[in-house]
Amino acid sequence: MATAKSNRRRTVSIQRTEAFDRDLATIMRTGMTQSDAIRFAAEFVAHGYQSAWEAGAVPDGQHPSHMLMKVRASHSQQGDDQRV
């Protein structure tokens, strides 16, 4: 059975900058709330770090100098018609 303490919401306080607010607004364009966007960003970077460490690309506990994100084109987007 979970205790009352483990059911409490935990919060994090961060110092916001203009760059952070721009980045957050970019993520929120997907319809996420601020909290969801921050959680998503943390999970996304953590996944990249974990993958780099497990692959041996970077020593455990160190951050990679570069990370790449692959994006698959959305099926809803169509390119310009190139037929003549």
Image: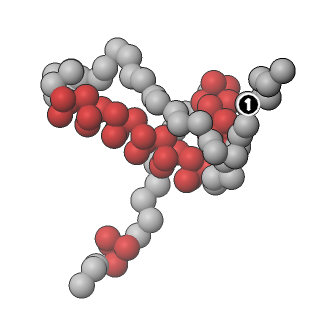
- Quadrant holding the N terminus: bottom left
Quadrant housing residue 28? top right
Q: Report crowding for label 1: few under 14, some 14 to 19, many 20 or more residues within 10 A (C-alpha).
A: few
1 relative to 32 in the view: left or right = left
76 relative to 62 in the view: left or right = right
Quadrant housing residue 57? top left
Figure check: 50 above or below 84:
below
Q: Position of residue 19 (x, y in %)?
A: 63, 24
Which residue lies at the image location 34% right of the left edge and 78% below the top edge? 4
Question: Which residue is under mark 1?
Answer: 79
Quadrant housing residue 63? top left
Which residue lies at the image location 63% right of the left edge and 52% below the top edge? 32
Q: Position of residue 65 (x, y in %)?
A: 34, 15
Q: Position of residue 72 (x, y in %)?
A: 53, 36
9 relative to 31 in the view: left or right = left
Q: Quick check: can you spot residue 75?
A: yes
Residue reaching furthest to the top: 65
Helix, strand or loop at mark 1: loop
Inspect the image, locate mark 1, and give the three-letter code of the amino acid beneath it. Answer: Gly
- Say which of 17 and 25 sits in front: 25
Figure check: 34 above or below 49:
below
Which residue lies at the image location 37% right of the left edge and 73% below the top edge? 7
Q: Position of residue 80 (x, y in %)?
A: 78, 28
Figure check: 40 above or below 53:
below
